[in-house]
Amino acid sequence: MLLLDPATRAAQLVDRIAELERVKAAATAEQAHAAVLLDRARREEEAANGVPRGRQGAGVATEITLARQDSPARGSRHLGFAKHW
């Protein structure tokens, strides 16, 4: 490994932090899109199986919670944000 002066090394680290933030934002956007698609798929499946409209998609927030390894309240919130995004 090349020895870099502290200012150059610090600048590279700032660039890396910014790069990781862009990756994180892209992943968040993709999660939101996938959540909307999951909600749509579950509702279509449940409609085809005769589930009343008011009950369709009832478990989607829980599925998102489990997939994200998150709290139930946050899973529901993530789905809500994704659907309005």
Image: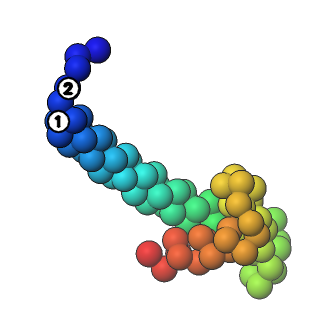
In the rendered structure, the answer to whether residue 58 lies left or right of residue 26 reads: right
Query: Which of the 4 image quadrants contains residue 55?
Result: bottom right
Quadrant of the drawing holding the C terminus: bottom left
The amino acid type of the residue labelled 2 equals Leu
Instruction: Assess whether mark 2 and mark 1 are in contact (beta carbons under 8 angstroms).
Output: yes
* Residue at the spot of label 2: 4
Indicate whether 33 appears above or below 2. Answer: below
Quadrant of the drawing holding the N terminus: top left
Q: Is residue 14 visible?
A: yes
Depth check: 56 or 32 in front? 32
Mark 1 surroundings: few (<14), some (14-19) or many (≥20) residues within 10 A: few
Indicate whether 74 appears above or below 35. Answer: below
Seen at 64% across and 66% down, the residue is 39
Q: Is residue 44 visible?
A: no
Q: Position of residue 63 (x, y in %)?
A: 74, 59
Q: Disc 1 on helix, strand or loop?
A: helix
* Label drawn at residue 29: none
* Residue at the spot of label 1: 8
Depth check: 43 or 59 in front? 59
Indicate whether 54 appears above or below 15. Answer: below
Q: Disc 2 on helix, strand or loop?
A: loop
Q: Position of residue 5 (x, y in %)?
A: 17, 30
In the rendered structure, the answer to whether residue 80 lies left or right of residue 2 reads: right
In the rendered structure, the answer to whether residue 57 lies left or right of residue 4 reads: right
Seen at 71% across and 54% down, the residue is 69
